Structures are given as C-alpha cells and as structure tokens.
Image (cartoon, rainbow, N blue to C red):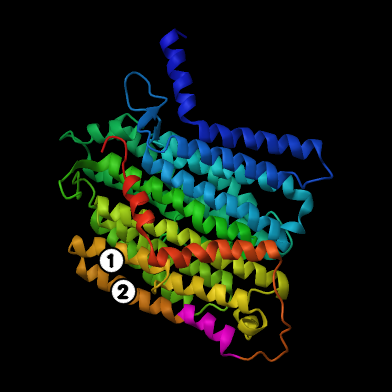
Amino acid sequence: MNTNSLNYLVNSLYLIKPELAISITLVLLVLVDLIFIKNKKFLPYVSLAGLVVAGYFIIEQFSTNTFAFATNNSAGMLIVDPFGNFFKLLIVFASIALVFFSLSSKEIKESFERHGEYYTLIFGMILGMMIMVSAADLIVIYVALELVSLSSYVLAGITRQSLRNSEASLKYVIYGGISSGIMLFGISIMYGITGSTNLYEINSLIQAPQIQSLTFVLAGILIFVGIGYKISAAPFHFWTPDVYEGAPLPITAYLSIASKAAGFALLIRFIKITFMQSVDAEGFWHLLGIIDWKTFIIIISILTMTLGNFAALWQSNMKRLLAYSSIAHAGYLLLGLAVMSNEGITAILIYFIVYALMNLGAFYVVMLIANKIGSEELDDYKGLGYSSPFLGASLGIFLVSLTGLPPTAGFIGKLYIFIALVDAKMIAVAVIALLNTVVSLYYYIKVLKHLYLDKSQKEVPAFSASLGSLVMVVALVAPVLIFGVYFTPLVDLAKHSITLLGF
C-alpha cells in the first residue's frame, strides 16, 4: 500500500468516527459482560457513554460533505453529509431513550441474565442503521440492512417470557427473510443491467438510451420492497402489529422510531441519487423518466395511511393500536417524499423529530402503566386518568400530538407536510391526508375516553411511577409542547440537513 492510499484510508476512517465509536462500544459491552458475569449493572452506563461519544462525533462533523472509501476516482461507498448526520443524530437520540426505557422496563429487568446479549444486539442494530443512512453502494446497503434485521429479529423475542415473544420473533424472521430475498434479487438485476453497484455510477449509466427500461423498473420496485418492509409501508407492513405487540415495549418503541428513520433515509437517498436528473431553482426534483416514482409513492402513501388508520379503529390493545398508528404515520411521511422537492424533504425531517418525541413518549407511558397494572389492553385503562393523573395527562398530550392538533408539535409536523403538498399543487392528495387525520382522531380520542370517561368495574388504586421515570416523561412532554409554539429551531435544523452530497 503506497502512502497516498494509506492517507486516504486513514482519512476515511476519520470520517466514520461515529461508527467506530459504536463498534468499539459493542466490543466493550461483550468484554464487560464476560468479566462481570454476575453483575450486569455496568452495561447501561457503558452503552450511554458510547452513545454520547458517537453523538459528539456526529455533531462535530455535521456540516461535512464528502465521500469515504472511494476507489479509482469513483464515488465512495459511504457518504458523510448533513442529511446522513441528521438521521444518525436521530438514531443516537432514540438509542439513548431506549437505554433509559430499558432501565424502567419490568420485562427487561426480569430478563437480567440476557442483558449482555440485549445491549450488544442493540449496538449491532445501531451500527447497521448508521451505515444504512450513509451508504451509496447497493452491496453496502444490503449488508447494513441485514445487520439491522438480524439484530432486531433476536431483540423482538429476547425476553422469552410468553408465547407472543417467540411468535413476534418468528414472524419477523419470516417476513424479513422474504423481503430481504426480494431486495437482493432486485439488486442483482440492477447490477446485471449496469455492471455497477454504486448509486452515483448507476445514475450516469442509466441515462444511456440503450438501457432496458422495463427490466430496470422491475429491479427498482424489488429494491423498494426491501426498504418498504423496513419503514412499514403497505402492503409490506404485515409484520408490524404482531411484532410490536409481542416484542418488549422498549424494543417496540425503538423499532417504531430508529428503524423507520434509517429506512426513510435509505429510501430518500436511493431515489434521489440513483434517479436524479436535475433540481430546479424552486427546489423541485426532475427525475429520469424510467420509473414514475411520484405516482408510485403517492399510491403507496395513500394505501399506507388509509390502511393504518382504519385498522387502528378496531384495536383493543395499546401496542397494536400504536403499531397501526405508526403505519399511518409512515404514509404521511411518504407524502413528503412524493412531493419530490427539497421542501418535501424538509417537511419529512421536521416530522421525524416531532414523531420521535411523541411516539417515544406514548410508548414510554404505556410501558409505565403496563409495569403497574400488568396489562396493555384498552379496557384496563378505564379510570386511569384519575388513579394516575400525571401519566394519564401525559399520554393524552402525546396522543393529541400524534393526531396533529395544535398547540402540540404534532401539528407543526403535519402542517409542513401539507404546505409542501399544496406548494406542489397536490391538493387532492392533501385532502385525502386530511381526511385520514380525521379518522385517526377517533381512535386516539377513544383512548382518552377510556382514561377519563369510562368507569372501571373494579376499583383502580392510585399509583405513580418512580421519580426517574417521571423525569423522563417530563423530558418528552416538554419539547412536544414547546415545539408546538416555538418551532424555529426545528425548521432551521431541517433546512440545514437536506443537503445530499452531489445535489
């Protein structure tokens, strides 16, 4: 290896400092678990330290815009840009929340002997997601996706306290294996047509007139299947309610935020880099006409939000209700991508910050209630608004925000999606999304009805969570209310983060 190659390798390693920090923490977790076999209390603190270091490195290089691991003067295999760093920061935030959730979770505490594997697999998942959001090569994308999937399969059933844990893990493996195989088939077709797996090179190659457009359309759709599965887009969402219900609550919350965020980052990067032709002065994208992504994504988004909202109407289990809710929110997020503009991507980034806060908050309160009453069934929530006023009020705020009502941050997230749709003259689609929001109001209000208006057949004793848990709830409620009134920092961060390398 000559000096230039060595310098470039060192520079590339410097650019992936967050991923290296996560990898080192993963190794440390394994070592700590082996050294302190009977004492697992250090694992969460090692995890938090690793996440803080990774977060610092991400912030340090937030505005960096370059390739890592490029060969022969071609585009690199990984991209370090503000867009990727935004999603990495979101993943780190969700991961820190997951560690705190795990410290409060009765399910996780009862699986004490598996804590080593639990935290190690979480960091394997984090590493895979960080590579996913930065990948510019189909092979790297597939390997990262598999790293995330294999870790999450085990995490979904790690407690093994009931049959539903094993069922969740098994269904996740089956659906995941099928979607992974379909995606790999699409990648092989795309490589066969272009002779390259690099997204930037594929973009230049498919502009040739002799490209086999029909075969390329098939390859693109097959790759979308693998990504659509990860973001719970219909009709690739079937795993979501069963896995969310069966998995431990901290993992359910994590899958609904971090995994979805990584999937969306990958989808946006895949479409924009591979099919981009130009961006006009107003920020609207002009894609190559091989695949009509705009129409395709509009259809998928309408199907996703409609199916998610209407299926949620009939749910009597809070985890299943929030699972279908997360499917519906994937539909709203897809609308931001369907706009095919920088404004649409800005709306997606704003929505993701807000969605992370309110969804994590809702799942956390559901977990705290489940710890006390031993149930996630909606019928057991009757009267809880009075027996636990703070948790009831907090859950109400999160649900109102998930609906998208002012003065919560959820309203701001949906507002920017609707503004992007109206600016793109997609009025009919905006109306459909608005009607779906009205439908979602019904099942969120149904939870509030059980909390405050319905009386339980049995006496519900007053209860509260620990001080640490209450502080965590406040830490999630406060920004949901603050950003509902003062949201300029969210908009500024999102606008700074829409830059993708090369466009």
Q: Hey, which residue is sitting farthest right in the picture?
A: 38
**In this rendering, the label closer to the viewer, 2 or 1:** 1
224 within the magenta span: no
Judging depth in this view, the residue of 486 and 197 nearest the camera is 486
Q: Are marks 2 and 1 in contact (CB under 8 Å)?
A: yes
* Residue sitting at x 50%, y 52%: 259
Q: Is residue 109 above or below residue 190?
A: below
**What crowding class fits label 2: few (fewer than 14 Cα within 10 Å), some (14-19), or many (20 or more)?**
some
451 within the magenta span: yes
Residue 418, which numbered label? 1
Q: Hey, which residue is sitting farthest top in the picture?
A: 2
Residue 51, picture quadrant: top right
Residue 136, picture quadrant: top left
Q: Which residues are magenta?
A: 443-454
Q: Is residue 371 above or below residue 26?
A: below
The x and y percentages for residue 122 are 61, 46
Q: Which residue is mark 2?
A: 434
